[in-house]
Image (cartoon, grey):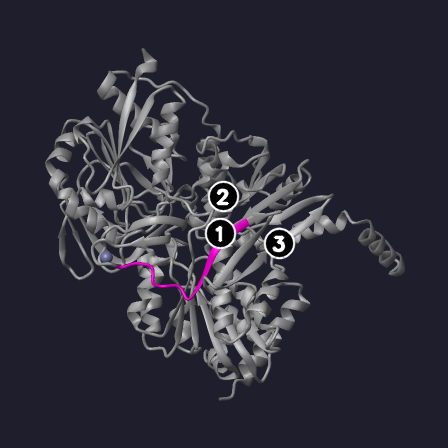
Amino acid sequence: MINLMELTICHMYPDLLNLYGDIGNIINLKKRCEWRNINANIVNFTVGSDVDLTKTDIFFMGGGSDRGQSIVYSDLTQYQKVLSNAIEDKTTFLAICGGYQLLGESYIDAMGNRIPGLGVLDYTTESEEGRLIGNVILKNHLGLKPETLVGFENHGGRTYHDYDTIGTILTGNGNNGKDNLEGMVYKNCLGTYLHGPVLPKNPHLADHIILTALKEKYDIDKLEQIDDKLEYKAHHNVLDLYGV
Amino acid sequence: MDMRPSIIAGKLTIYGLKVFGMKGTALPCKVAMRLNPDILKLIDLRCKKKLIITGTNGKTTTNNLINHILAENYPNILSNLMGANMPQGIASAFLNNLKEEYDWGIFEVDEGSFEDIVKYIKPDYVLITNFFRDQLDRFGEIENTSKMVYDAIKPLDTTLILNADDPMVVKFKDLNKPSIYYGVQKTNFSSMNQSVVESRFCPECNEGLEYEYYNYGQLGKYHCENCGFKNPDYKYRISSIEYINNSYEFEIGTSPGDSSTINFGYDGIYNAYNCCAAVAFARETGLKMDIIKSRIGNFDYKLGRMENFTYKSRTIKIVLVKNPIGLTEVLHSIANDERRKSLLFILNDNPADGTDVSWIWDADVETVQNIKNLENIFFSGIRADDIALRLKYSGKTVKPELINSNIEDSIEDAMNSAVEIVYILPTYTAVYNTREIVINLINSNNPKIQRFREVLRSKLGA
Ligand SMILES: [Zn+2]
């Protein structure tokens, strides 16, 4: 019955939240499903879309420009309840950078103004001087092998929270450049500052996301192995460049 | 103003670099700039008229085209033709070509340096090509980049030459400066779908823009249902593009009755825009269309950006790629070429390339599927694995043995592959290297040059 598995992946606001190659995560998830004969149904959701969000198996939300994010925020508030229910019900969610910030309580900008977020999760992001830009290498807390995760960060906001995190920083800044931690984990919702895009060079993380969603839907606990030599070669190239 | 000490220091540095066999289009002037930051002011004084070309893509080509056209009438032009487009690069061009007076100063200027440069060099014209995402890790978002340029133009007494097909550029009409618009009408190369997601929101009111067609990135015919923002009327426009014998033919003119056919030997709809920009500017300076037409027709690129070489009877073509729109358009134009071919991607992540290589995922690399007679794809550069991975996820089979971060070896392998044409697509910091390696390989394969070297060696007694 393996052939009949299907995942609905909802790409949130692909026209507005589309910085730094985040679309690569969608390309990646789709291919990795296809290679295993899992049907990946990509649904683009944006302003004015008529989509039943409750049918989603994986939500994906990337980062955007200030303008893009403000348009998204004013549209997204009407789905606050749907999204928070989905996250509580253990729907898989991957939110990158601006998307990660948007799920929190608020964003405090450089002038000290408090801009409310969706408030689905309990954290705030503060704008601080200097953007955090560069390659990032983590030791992951998700129990994934290999232990490292690699990516590229580019953000002005610093996020502070008490949730579990995705990993400990080996190179780079992460959530706030202070506590050496990166990302946020709540149930099956992952928030992270990693672009790159994050999934192609971290096939173990990509499969973790696919497996989490399949577990919820089909109660399976293992994915078919596929050839990841090229993926891990690119992963190790980043480690080598930074001597990790 | 006595600039002599800094000029002498700059010159000495250039001399020193030459003696030691180093090259640097920007390096010597770091010294000169440190000694006298006003060196740009001197450039301003010595150029009778000035044009600054800025925007994301097409600056170097447009600059070279305009220089080539204007050279017909003006013997003394100061320009940074090599594409070093920050203050040191412009100062370098000056120190390498010192004259008391220039008819024209024509400079391509990096969007991020625009503000710093126009503090000293006051342009009579500013030509803006487009605003795409480029090297985001340096400037944040394109809105911020274009805003920086916009604010810097405000106090200037200048005429704007604007790409009417880019909403981000047309926003500059709000500056109320004298403005000349150019653009490309619907042609065989226009499409109904945009292949790369770029900014396509109204710069006046943030509503989504409606498009009748796209030419390239967010360039096309657009309007805003909400506030009426739309393409302004063209003064100069291209009305048709034909691809004949691996070169392009443009119908270009000021109005339907007044148009000429121009031949241009280089690929891509982006070059239609570059040509149109050059024509618009050249016409504004008073040059006749006949002259412009023949100059564009015999334009020959010498800078390793779109250069053609011949090696063992196959064509070698080097095309710089540096951002998603550029890469997408280059792949589209390669798809028009039916010859048996190899591709070599060279991806670096040095600061001048942009240290973030994620942009390759924003390009429509899936277009590679449409390239006919594609025999081999090679991958090289610091981030060879990243571009190989991108190709794998576009659905192409990647051969691990064709991935090699050593640029020299990869170029040699690609150039020796049994095909009719080899396309080499390097990022910025790999371009000059690539060109040198290609030329060395060609020379080492040329019996005349080999013979000459042998004679030279025997005469030197070596
Ligand atoms: Zn509008």
Q: Position of residue B390 (x, y in %)?
A: 45, 37
Q: Are marks 1 and 2 in contact (CB under 8 Å)?
A: yes
Instruction: Indicate the secondary structure of the residue bearing disc 3.
Output: loop
Instruction: Indicate the secondary structure of the residue bearing disc 1.
Output: helix
Q: Residue tagged by mark 1? A: B269
Q: Where, by quadrant of the figure, is residue A182 drawn?
A: top left
Q: Is residue B231 inside the magenta stretch?
A: yes
Q: Residues within 10 Å of mark 2 (few under 14, many from 20)?
A: many
Instruction: Indicate the secondary structure of the residue bearing disc 2.
Output: helix
The chain carrying label 1 is: B
Q: How far apart are the alpha carbons under marks 1 and 3?
A: 17 Å
The chain carrying label 2 is: B
- Vertical placement of B133 versus A48: above or below? below
Q: Is residue A121 left or right of residue B360?
A: left
Q: Residue tagged by mark 3? A: B307
The tag on residue B332 is 2
Q: Position of residue B317 (x, y in %)?
A: 62, 48
Please state which amino acid type lies under the numbered disc 3.
Glu
The residue stretch that appears in magenta:
B229-242
Image quadrant of ligand 1 equals bottom left
Q: Residues within 10 Å of mark 1 (few under 14, many from 20)?
A: many
Say which of A47 and A182 sits in front: A47
